[in-house]
Image: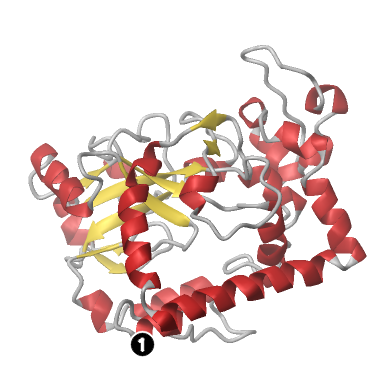
Amino acid sequence: MSIQTIADKGIVEHRVNPWKPGGDLKPQHAALQAAESEPAIRNADWAICMDVDEFINIKLGDGTLPTLYAAMEAALPGANMISLTWRLFGNGDVDGYEDRFLLDQFALCAPEVVRKPHQAWGFKTLFRNIELYKKLGVHRPKGLKPDLWDQVKWLNGSGKRMPKEMFRNGWRSTLETYGYDWVQLNHYAVRSAESFLVKRDRGRVNHVDRDQGLHYWFRMNHNVETERSIQARIPLLQAEWDRLMADPDIRAAHHACVAAHKARIAELQARPEQAAFHAELTGDRMRRLSRLTPHFGSAVFNAGPQVVPDEIALAESLPPGFFFTVQHEGGAAH
């Protein structure tokens, strides 16, 4: 759906990212910096930086933000921040793109306790806009004002207090700080294999020099557990969708975007190197690996799927507690 179309209808506000190639800032950081002076941000009661493939999954009551805010206030009067830990959702062996709700298509994901890769327990932060911090950040507001430490009242996704050690720079959960009981952030980073071709072709918003290739798919594609809690909100989503689609301009813009996405998939699939990449994504080895991710150490995710021996990758099953890692210097290269 064209963002500008729904912006013209007054449903959202849209700004063109001021990022320029060769500048000092990455695209996402340039957008955040520009947003800080926007009235929509400055006048907001609450704010969060999140992506279009991330969905706030509130498990309390009716699943709405007011319900979450009320629970926060009851647990900690004056609570002004809450972390939404990622739950990484895989492609669920879905190959072809369909014009359907992601929440309905994809229900396989990483377990709650999965500390590797390091992205698995990253979080985004919903915060009250009361200027405790100096600027927006990708995962949480940044630049805590030195004299305001005691005013930070930060909860995790289960309504428990976050430790002070997280206040300045923390951006990922730990065994002590993760929580999914109240709220989590469903992260659909890969979606269908066909759509991933388009995502890879578009490029990345932060690590612009890195390929979103097989290594990225391996790190983010977790098909280990079934988790359908967000599907309870589909009736509300459907009602809003129907309301939007009743507008002929919005409906036409949506269909045009779907057609463009399908055309891009076909164009990419016609290229031999992209067809080979797609075949590898959907092959038996990568499908099996997506179900074994809790067994791998961080070095395995950094090195890439090729370091996993076939006797592990293609095993019918692995014993509980089985763990595999390798020697690998540095972080993820891709």
User: Does 76 sit left or right of 137 as displayed?
Assistant: left
- In-front residue for pair 220/280: 280
Residue under the point 37% across and 35% down: 178
Q: Nearer the viewer, residue 98 or 133?
A: 98
Q: x, y percentage for residue 156? A: 29, 40
Above or below, 176 against 17 in this view is above
**Which residue appears at 16% of the width and 53% of the height?**
66
Q: Quadrant of residue 86?
A: top left
| Residue located at (76% from left, 31% from top) | 326
Does any portion of residue 138 appear in the rendered image? yes
Residue furthest to the top in view is 319
Judge whether residue 26 can be spotted in this image. Answer: no
Q: Which x, y percent locates residue 61?
A: 20, 40
Whole-percent x, y for residue 142 in the image: 35, 63
**What kind of colouring is applied to the model shown?**
secondary structure
- Which residue matches tag 1? 8
* Quadrant that contains the C terminus: bottom right
